Image (tube, rainbow, N blue to C red):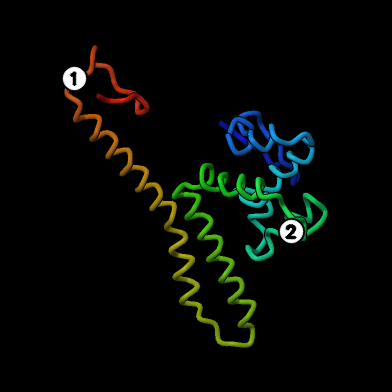
Amino acid sequence: MKLFDIVGGKVTIHTEALGLPFFKDLWDNNKDKDLVTRYISYIVLKNKYDSPYVKSTPADQLESKVKKAVFYDEDYQLPTEVLIAEEQYNTVVQDSLALRLLMSSRKKLDSIREYYDNSLDDILDDKKVKDITAAIGNLDKTISSLDKLESSVRANELSKISKVRGDEKINPYELVN
């Protein structure tokens, strides 16, 4: 299920996204659909891992930059229901181990950038930077190992089931008695 596309800095909202309760509430409780579209676009551009703003903007400047792009005012005050929808979006849609690792890695890389910026006249600790970048380089292997472990645990749980009619495999989403 694809909720959004970001093309040319613009968010295309798919109908599945409006099925999420927090976006549906925004949509249903507001007559100005253009404004609701901008609210949702703001949430996506500020939080989605592949947003051009998330990829290119330091975390401390992200909010004001996206507000300026979407609302033409970097000090725009969002209504409480939009802040709640943003929090729920981050909790429901964005809260996976892989995405948290990705965001943390980006923050760490940004801290390296800041380290280089702030220490132009100092002796650099290249070993520390190499250690951090090497650790980030190994994250994909770690995520892959976790996925394999999760599949193994799921398979082990399913193998403990003694009887299944017709020797069929149980779908992972089926309830087991």
Check disc 1 and report the residue beneath it: 163
What's the CA distance linking mark 1 and mark 2? 58 Å
127 or 101, which is in the foreground? 101
Residue located 43% across and 56% down the image: 139
Q: Mark 1: which amino acid?
A: Lys
Image-quadrant location for residue 60 = bottom right
130 or 167, which is in the foreground? 167
Judging from the image, what secondary structure is the residue with disc 2 in?
A: helix
Judging from the image, what secondary structure is the residue with disc 1 in?
A: loop
115 or 26, which is in the foreground? 26
Residue 76, numbered circle:
none
Check disc 2 and report the residue beneath it: 65
Tag 1–tag 2 contact (CB < 8 Å):
no
Image-quadrant location for residue 28 = top right
Q: Mark 2: which amino acid?
A: Lys
Residue furthest to the right in view is: 72
Residue 38 drawn at (x, y percent)? 75, 43
Q: Looking at the image, is 128 positioned above or below residue 58?
A: below
Q: Is residue 80 left or right of residue 135?
A: right
